[in-house]
């Protein structure tokens, strides 16, 4: 008996496969394919291949994330908030606050005994999400994954005056031409983003243990800046991208096991490995 | 006869005018570029050339805008709010409200019959509420800014952007293009989103008619029409909407000098 959790994010698709006992068989992430969005099914195919399984071997599949709405190869959709909360809790049983910073949104979740009790999120303005770092890294001609390490060499933080990502992009280029050091600008960018995320998170009472997830949690400079902004220790999972998919697979296992125990028939969809549809698109 | 100069160094464009007393003689606009000082100097020489004057003919120069400090030859600085009000009052003395759609922000100014500011509001520095959004999407659509308005005007089915953010809007536009949505519907969607934000800004200071629109955004005729629809009014548009604040700066430069000469006479 096997289960799958699929987290289709705006940038990356993450798939986790487990057996009945919850052992991880496969953990795969790959690009969702921002323009054509045909790649989520490809990531699923790779995960199955890695575990030497066929899609029909999977008893139950839960999809989550921004692209969860119409996944032709999933049996059920569950919000990313519930899945993230569950995934983080499985890794850190003492978690009370989880902050997830992705490429398209940022959210802060309050968790009690693995259950989501409250949350705040921003998906309206890029300046409070990982996109802020993506855009400014591109403007500075550096790789996103190098930002954190470079920023650790900073001797000061250059204040970034612009909140708007578009204007910050122009500002960092001007700062370089004015002779400011790259590492100091990066420290300033991390500080600016961390400050905005912290302001959002403080709308909920922040309690330890605090766990940081999402692609931005891979940036060591951001982890440091978040620690300073929140004045709180921060735990980061070994693989901060997959907590949503992990939560999804755990919930898939639970839903299926509960239904079987109750003797209920679960509807499983025709498993077509086709491209997913995003929110808003079904109306057009 | 006395000539006066007004220089407005904005974040995107640097603009300048020469007036003879209060009449416009010459105007010039260039991209501000990285060095505002160089831009200010270039605007001055272009204006002097166009007016067939010499530096000594200019009685006084007033600088305004984001880069006003870089106008090293200016006699004084003035706020861009005050300059925009004076400039629009010079062109449309009847205007009681002016909407200035600039590259980094939008300003709505209420003014009296003498061009004195009575109230104003400035948008956050957010690309989605300013001309910056148009610049970003024009770049994605690979069209000149000048073609944006005429293109958008052809749309019958403007798209709706999902968020109020120009960065997310840029991604949405790319997706729509790949889906084969016509460019004009994307451009018109930008104008619709921007006009909505501008209209709520206008409501903050309350619209008093007649209302004028200026700044680089006023060159986008489809945006102007969309704002007119949102506000249910007709807007006054100057022939050269980009130079209004520079004109106001020249008016301020002329004001003390003419009153002095008046005293002498």
Image: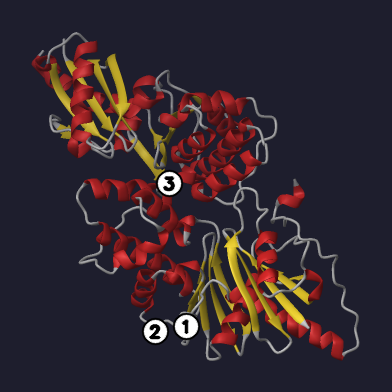
The reply to whether callout 2 and callout 1 are in contact (CB within 8 Å) is yes
Q: Chain of mark 3?
A: B
Q: Chain of mark 2?
A: A
- Name the foreground residue: A219 vs A101: A219
The image shows residue A4 at horizontal and vertical percentages of 71, 75
Q: Quadrant of the N terminus of chain B?
A: top left
Q: Nearer the viewer, mark 2 or mark 3?
A: 2
Disc 2 versus disc 3: distance between alpha carbons?
A: 37 Å
* Residue A208 locus on image (x, y percent): 46, 87
Q: Are marks 2 and 3 in contact (CB under 8 Å)?
A: no
- The circle drawn on residue B83 is none
Q: Nearer the viewer, mark 3 or mark 1?
A: 1
Of A45 and B31, nearer the camera is A45
- Whether residue A181 sits left or right of residue A12 in the image: it is left
Q: Say which chain tag 1 marks.
A: A
Q: Dot 1: few (<14), some (14–19), or many (≥20) neighbours within 10 Å?
A: many
Residue B59, percent from left and from top = 13, 20
Query: Is residue B187 toward the left or the right of residue A274 in the image?
Result: left
Q: Residue at x 72, y 57 (%)?
A: A276
Q: Decide if residue A249 is in sight here.
A: yes
Quadrant for residue B44, please give it. top left
The residue identified by callout 1 is A210
User: What is the x, y in percent for residue A255?
Assistant: 78, 82
Q: What SS does tag 3 mark?
A: loop
Give the residue at mark 2: A233
Is A44 drawn above or below residue A249 in the view shown? above
Residue pictured at 41% horizontal, 59% vertical: A144
Residue that carries the numbered disc 3 in the rendered image: B123
Distance from label 2 to label 1 (Cα)?
A: 7 Å
In depth, the one of A37 and B4 nearer the eye is A37
């Amino acid at each position: 008996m096997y289960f799958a959790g699929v987290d289709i994010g705006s940038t990356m698709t993450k798939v986790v496969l487990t057996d009945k006992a919850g052992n991880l068989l496969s953990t795969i992430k790959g690009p969702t394919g921002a323009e054509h969005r045909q790649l989520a099914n490809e990531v699923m195919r790779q995960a199955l291949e890695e575990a030497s399984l066929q899609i029909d071997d999977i008893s139950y599949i839960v999809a989550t994330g921004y692209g969860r709405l119409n996944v032709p190869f999933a049996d059920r959709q569950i919000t990313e908030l519930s899945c993230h909360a569950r995934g983080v809790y499985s890794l850190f049983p003492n978690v009370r606050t989880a902050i997830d910073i992705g490429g398209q949104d940022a959210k802060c979740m309050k968790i009690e005994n693995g259950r989501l009790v409250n949350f705040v999120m921003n998906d309206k303005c890029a300046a409070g999400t990982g996109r802020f770092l993506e855009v400014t890294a591109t403007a500075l001609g550096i790789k996103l994954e190098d930002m954190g390490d470079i920023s650790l060499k900073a001797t000061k933080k250059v204040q970034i005056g612009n909140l708007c990502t578009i204007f910050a992009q122009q500002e960092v280029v001007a700062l370089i031409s004015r002779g400011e050091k790259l590492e100091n600008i990066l420290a300033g960018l991390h500080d600016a983003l961390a400050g905005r995320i912290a302001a959002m998170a403080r709308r909920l009472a922040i309690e330890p243990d605090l766990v940081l997830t999402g692609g931005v949690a891979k940036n060591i400079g951001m982890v440091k800046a978040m620690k300073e902004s929140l004045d709180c220790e921060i735990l980061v999972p070994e693989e901060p991208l997959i907590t949503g998919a992990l939560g999804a697979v755990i919930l898939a296992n639970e839903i299926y096991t509960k239904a079987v125990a109750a003797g209920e028939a679960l509807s499983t969809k025709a498993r077509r490995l086709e491209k997913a549809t995003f929110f808003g698109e079904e109306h057009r | 006869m006395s000539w006066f100069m007004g220089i407005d160094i904005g974040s995107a464009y640097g603009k300048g005018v020469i007036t003879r007393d209060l009449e416009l003689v010459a105007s010039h606009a260039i991209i501000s570029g990285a060095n505002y000082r160089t831009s200010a100097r270039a605007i001055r020489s272009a204006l002097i050339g166009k007016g067939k004057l010499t530096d000594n003919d200019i009685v006084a120069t007033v600088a305004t805008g984001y880069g006003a400090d870089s106008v090293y030859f200016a006699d004084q600085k003035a706020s861009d709010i005050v300059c925009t009000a004076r400039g629009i009052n010079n062109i449309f003395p009847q205007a009681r409200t002016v909407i200035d759609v600039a590259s980094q922000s939008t300003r709505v100014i209420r003014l009296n019959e003498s061009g004195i500011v009575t109230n104003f509001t400035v948008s956050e520095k957010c690309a989605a509420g300013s001309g910056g959004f148009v610049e970003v999407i024009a770049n994605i659509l690979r069209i000149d800014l000048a073609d944006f308005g005429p293109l958008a005007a052809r749309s019958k089915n403007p798209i709706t952007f999902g968020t109020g953010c120009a960065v997310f809007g840029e991604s949405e536009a790319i997706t729509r293009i790949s889906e084969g949505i016509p460019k004009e519907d994307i451009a018109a969607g930008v104008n619709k989103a921007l006009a909505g934000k501008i209209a709520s800004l206008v409501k903050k200071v309350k619209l008093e008619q007649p209302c004028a629109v200026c700044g680089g955004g006023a060159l986008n005729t489809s945006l102007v029409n969309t704002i007119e629809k949102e506000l249910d009014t007709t807007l006054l548009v100057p022939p050269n909407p980009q130079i209004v604040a520079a004109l106001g700066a020249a008016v301020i430069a002329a004001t003390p000098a003419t009153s002095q000469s008046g005293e002498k006479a």
